[in-house]
Amino acid sequence: MITKIFDISSRSLSVYRRALEVASHNIANANNPAFSRQRVIFETDISDLNAGKVWGNGVRISDVQRVRDSLIEAHIREANSKFYNNSRQSQLINNIESYFSEPGDLGLSNLFAGFFNSFDELATAPNSTPLRMNVLNAANNLSAKVNTINQSFARLKQDIKDEFQNQVQAINTLLKQIHQINKEQFNNSYKGLAVNDLLDKRDDLIQQLSQIVNITVTIDQNNNANVSIGGALAVDGLHAAEFETVETNGRLSIKLKNGGIPVILNGGHLNALSEVYSDKIPSYQKNLDQIVTAFVDAVNQIHKQGFSITNPPQTNLNFFDSYENGVLKVNQNILSNPSLISVSADGDNGNGDIALQIAGLREAQLVNGSTIVDAYSALINGIGNDALLQTNYAQANNMVLSQLEDQRQSLSGVSIDEEMTNVLKFQRSYEASAKLITVADEMIKTILEMV
């Protein structure tokens, strides 16, 4: 009987010492956002049957559980994917909007107006060299801005492509780490070792992955995380896939290195880069090209009908050489000789009818029933609306993400007060168990003294 008390008490000491270790581990990780608090599960130890009687064997720890809600984790992954998609798109489109310098003196809207105004002024004094220089300055400023915008688009596309490739490398690194943890946790579980901290680290890696790309996650019977990206199996307990960047018909995506078709992206940082690279920038450039091409064609068509003030007068001259591959060029001959600006309708030096017609293009409906300025304003408004829409989506998803994080922290986060309460409780139980050993020792001494 006394031996039984020793056994139960010593076992109890071990149990509550372990419980105190778990509580200490929780407290130490109170400020670790990737940590899930751990809970000791106590259960009655298996009783003995002796001399027809059932004798209890005290308490034991059946498990140390992570307090984690898989449903909340799945919602956080989904919210991550949406937020980082919208947030990055918002940043990139806001950058694009800044290329146009609107509203401002350097914006195309003001430069178009300056170009038309310069011809309007030239019509009042067609032979004025200073006014002709004003026309060339206005044309050069307009050309430089158009070229700068298109250069910025090209540079941004290259930057996005580089960032996209870096993100794909980050995906491959995360997949390797997740696979390694899958192996380690399986081996540790087989050996009866603790795996909770490993699972926390794996969950954190999966959350990082969900910020980059849309994923689906399932946990198999061996507690391995099986992760798919856009329907393609990326990692499980046996292997980790490797992805590479692919560009198909101008669209950035990823595919498995060993083959397969491009993955369908619909969320995360990677999708934002793909959307802006593949859809937004080409759409904005197409609209800008349409506006500039219509402008150039209309100006050249009228300008060719005019006569220069050279001797002899020249006609059938284009004011702009070309607009190709995003580069707007003013006629080099006109730049070298302002007298070649053709503003006379009949060859007389004092005639400015052609200049008036060019100035009147500001009111002409040249782009799908809209004026140059109106079509350009629609482009700028469209870019602004795209940026605002993505910003609003990002803010909404951030609110959802914050709420989900609060739920996760309330469930899985460490409460210092709660853990200190557990420490006191486990300490009292530990002290009581030690007291039982003292009592049992005194009982043995009493019996020995009687003998």
Image: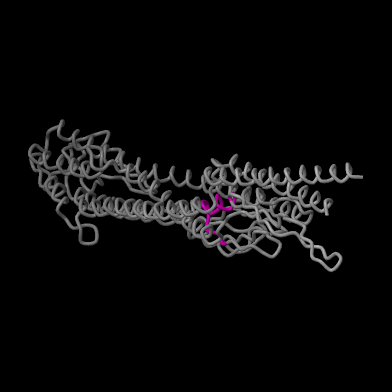
Name the quarter where the N terminus is drawn: bottom right
Q: Say whether residue 175 is visible.
A: no
In x, y percent, where is residue 313? 17, 41
The residue range painted magenta reads 204-216
Give the overall secondary structure of the magenta segment.
Answer: helix
In depth, the one of 187 and 255 nearer the eye is 187
The residue lying at 71 percent from left, 54 percent from top is 61
Q: Residue furthest top?
A: 130
Q: Residue furthest bottom?
A: 52
In the image, taking residue 161 as reference, residue 127 lies left or right, namely left
In x, y percent, where is residue 234? 63, 58
The residue lying at 82 percent from left, 53 percent from top is 4
Choose top left, top right, bottom left or bottom right for residue 431.
top right
Residue 367 versus residue 312 in the image, above or below: below
Residue 110 versus residue 194 in the image, above or below: above
Based on the picture, tell me whether residue 263 belongs to the magenta stretch: no
